Image (cartoon, coloured by chain):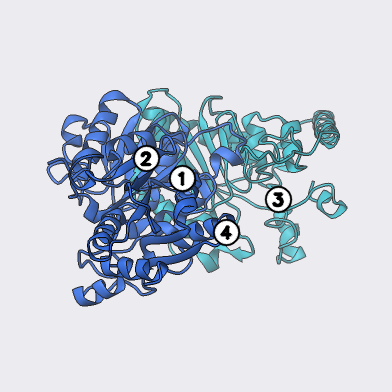
Chain colours: A blue, B cyan
Amino acid sequence: MITVLDRLNYALHHALETDERVYILGEDILDPYGGAFKVSRGLSTKFPERVLTTPISEAAIVGLATGMALRGLRPVAEIMFGDFVTLIADQLVNHASKFRWMYEEQVRVPMVVRTPMGGRRGYGPTHSQSLEKMFLGIPGLKVVAPNALGDPAELLATAIADDDPVLFVEHKLLYTCPLLEPGKGELIDLQVEHAGGDYPTFTLRSTERARLTIACYGYNFELARAAALHLLMEHEIFVEILLFSILSPFGIQPLFSSLARTRKLLTVEEGTLSLGWGAEVTTLAVEKVDGLQVRRVAALDFPIANAKSLEDAILPSMQDVVKAALELVGR
Amino acid sequence: MLSEFSTGKLAGTTHACIGQEADAAGIFSITEPEDVVFSNHRCHGHFLAYGGEPYRLAAELMGRATGLVGGRGGSQHIHWRNFYSNGIQGGIVPVAVGMALAEKVHATGRIALVFIGDGTLGEGTLYESLNMAALWKLPILFVLEDNGYAQTTPVGRNMAGTMSGRFTAFAIPVWERDTTDVLDIQSMTRETVHAVRSGAGPASLILHTYRFSAHSKGDDLRSPDELARIRKFDPLIVHGARLTTKECTKAESEISAIINDAFTRASADPFPVLSSEH
């Protein structure tokens, strides 16, 4: 079984093998530890000169990566927990994302910042968040999230080859997810359409007419699929799933195509509900699609608690998705 | 230039280095043209001493399409060849350290320079960067221009400990002098740049100097007495004493002509137009 983790790890190996400009920086990434989530496993053994373990200095890690990128290298920085992106905000917002435009296209900043986000592992308020929403809508910064359908290795390779800075958000629970293949296994009855080029958007459709569209990214695709299966088995409701790989900036055309068929949109994300990704996606959709009905499923506006009973209540569940979907279709 | 903000020829803000000119003049008389420089909000003097064209800077300050970065950056966000500046205290330092790392792995023989001020010493990112530069023996010179004030706040109200101690804590060698003499700064720079270029790792150059103008345009709370007292350290007076009156007059008239020409030419240039593509 090939997992998302395997593919991300492969992409880093492959990048180091094929491009000597690639450097990896981060905390505790050397073997035998290989990073807190093991995505960097094996890299330092094979490429000791280009895999740099750093002090606990997130701002400097990303600052150094930015300077390296400005001077011809292609650094990939690992931030151990996504919660720590607050420490790199100045570097991403006022430096990395600014230089290309601010210096009138005279420079490029080909840098990737990888970081694991998300909860459901009982890590508590400061090690469980999905903070990517804070970095959406920043000109010059791309925010990308792998999923179990599109090949995460290809997505990471695309980010490394990108001339602009990319914040690459990996949900922790995604690491152990097996890769899905269109037309096989769980996806055997679904048609998978692919749009959007390097950072693809996938549309999952069945042959029956769908009653609503569920938009999601990253690990929440797992939640959306489970909900879709439940809606079909228990309520005979077919849905279309729109799976985004890029959160900012993003093309919305594939979503419009789906909404033209369903006229009902449900967004699913693990960040807090208010002022989030779903708010932007639903607004863009409402502005363009007449008679559109929308719902958002997201984490409640709380810090993420440590106790499982509380964490489960705060984070969106498959049942929450089903409930919102039933509301949308009037059941 | 400062007076042109009130006439409306210049808009926004700027940070003049009047009184601190000897720092840049001395330092860039020693560095190589290909060395990589990261400057800060007070970057005009650094840029000109680096060899930048006054006309392109003037056009940038006036928001013209012909400016260094087409009017997108303005006074404190400029780039030309290997010269970069940004207006964020502390945040530029790790970027400069990353540049030094890139030059080291490319074995270019170049060094990086980053300019900070006494006010920057309050920023935590600086210390992360000093640590990593020293740990990895990167070819970077930290230039600390201490003009005594962080905007309006004197150093004594901002800083515990010593300036040199901040570098020696990371085993980064320090060259430190209270001077506005360009030849003095030149000779110190020669030693520090030699140390960095030899591959020994980072070094620091602490220059205690004086800022005659406000932090930016009008934010100066210092007394007229204090301003009068520090005037005797004017680097133009200090170095001017070595020149004949005729040499001084000639230099001043040449420079005035260059500056006037720069602003006159720039004022005829078009304003940039926003393109939806970028």
* Chain holding disc 1: A
| Residue nearer the viewer, A270 or A89 | A270
Where is mark 3, residue-wise? B14
> Is disc 3 surrounded by few (<14), some (14 to 19) or many (20+) residues within 10 Å?
many
| Residue nearer the viewer, A81 or B14 | A81
Real-space Cα separation, disc 2 to disc 3, in angstroms: 53 Å
- Under circle 2, the secondary element is strand
Q: Closer to the camera: disc 4 or disc 1?
A: 4
> Is disc 2 surrounded by few (<14), some (14 to 19) or many (20+) residues within 10 Å?
some
**Percent coordinates x, y for residue B191 in the rendering:** 47, 32
Real-space Cα separation, disc 4 to disc 1, in angstroms: 16 Å
**Percent coordinates x, y for residue A202 in the rendering:** 37, 44
**Percent coordinates x, y for residue B217 in the rendering:** 74, 56
* Chain holding disc 2: A
Where is mark 2, residue-wise? A193
Q: Is residue B159 visible?
A: no
Q: Residue at x 61, y 50 (%)?
A: B209
Where is mark 4, residue-wise? A290
For this view, does A298 lie left or right of residue B82?
left
Q: Residue at x 33, y 71 (%)?
A: A323
Indicate the amino acid at tag 4: Asp
Where is mark 1, residue-wise? A254
Q: Closer to the camera: disc 1 or disc 3?
A: 1
